[in-house]
Amino acid sequence: MRATAIEFRLRMPINAVIIVLGFWAPWIEVFGIGSRISLLEWLALEVSRARLLTFTFATPAVIIAAALVAGFAAVLRVWGTAYLGPGTVTSAHMKAERVMAAGPYRFVRNPLYLGVWGMVAGMSIVMPPSGALVSLLLVTVFLLRLIFGEEAFLSAKLGAPYQAYLARVPRLLPSLRTGISPSDAKPDWVRGVLSELLPIGVFLAIAVVSWSYDNRLVGRVILISLGVSMVVRALMPPSRTGQAEATNA
C-alpha cells in the first residue's frame, strides 16, 4: 500500500493526470458510460428530486458547499507550506530533519495531502459525475499510498519522537485536542501564499466564477491558476532557512 520512490518523485504530475482524467472522462464517449452533465447540475437535480430544496436553491447550496471545501483546502495548503517551506513541499525526495509540530501539524499529520484532496473535491463539481467519482477515488488511494510511505520513512529516520507524534496527532481528521506543544518553527506566509496559488485559484474559481454557471470558464480559471503557480514556483528563490519534516505535497 506504500508509494514507491518513483511515485513520490512524480506525485504532482500523477495528481495532475488524475484531475485531467476526471475532467476528460473518456469512457463517456468511448463506452457511453455516464453523461457530460456537470456534478453541480447532477447534485442540484438530485437534491431537488428528493424535495430537500428546489433546484433554484439547490444549485447555490452545492456551490457554497464546494467553495467551503475548496477554501478549507487552500487554507491548509498555505498554512502547511508556510511552516514546512516550499522547497521541502516540492522536493523530489522525502526529508526527515525533525518532527514538525507547528502550525497545522499540531492538529493533523498530513494537512497538505488533506488540502490536495479538498482541492480536487472542490473542483469536482465542474467535472462529469462519473469523472468526479473516478478522480476522487484515485486521488484518495494515491494520497493514502504517499502517506503510508512517508510514515514508514519518517518512523525509520526519526524514531521515538516521531512515534510519539503519531500517537497524539491524527492522520487525516484534524483534532484540536492533541496536546502537542508548538515547536519553534516560524511561518513564511509570503512564500506560503506564492507557492500555493493553484488551490487559491481553485477556491476563487468555485467561490466566484462558478456563479456564472459556465463550466468552461471555471476550467480556464483553474488551468490559468495551475500555469501561474508553476511559473511562480519555478522562479521562486530558495529559502535561506530550511524547515523540514515531511514533503507531503
Image: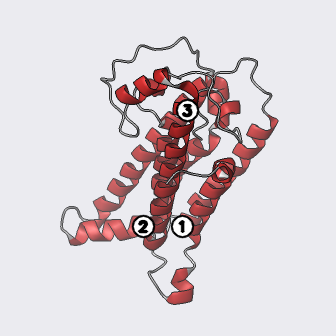
Q: Nearer the viewer, residue 153 or 51?
A: 153
How many callouts does the rendering have?
A: 3
Q: Please give the label number shown on residue 3.
A: none
Residue position marked by numbered label 3 in the rendering:
156
For the residue marked with disc 3, what is the amino acid? Ala
Q: Residue at x 35, y 61 (%)?
A: 59
Crowd rating for badge 2 (residues with CA inside 10 Å; few <14, some 14–19, many 20+): many
Q: Residue furthest top?
A: 184
Q: Residue at x 62, y 31 (%)?
A: 193
Say what secondary structure mark 3 lies in: helix
Q: Which tag, 1 or 3, sits closer to the chain's start?
A: 1
Say what secondary structure mark 1 lies in: helix
For the residue marked with disc 2, what is the amino acid? Leu
In the image, which is nearer the foreground, mark 2 or mark 3? Answer: 3
Q: Position of residue 143 (x, y in %)?
A: 51, 50
Q: Residue at x 26, y 65 (%)?
A: 47
Q: Could you give the CA–CA distance between mark 2 and mark 3, rounded to whole angstroms?
A: 42 Å
Name the quadrant containing residue 169.
top left
Q: Residue at x 45, y 69 (%)?
A: 38
Q: Could you give the CA–CA distance between mark 2 and mark 1, rounded to whole angstroms?
A: 11 Å
228 to the left or right of 30: right
Say what secondary structure mark 2 lies in: helix
Q: Residue furthest bottom?
A: 31
Q: Which tag, 2 or 3, sits closer to the chain's start?
A: 2
Residue position marked by numbered label 1 in the rendering:
22
Residue 208 appears in the picture as rendered: no
Residue position marked by numbered label 2 in the rendering:
39
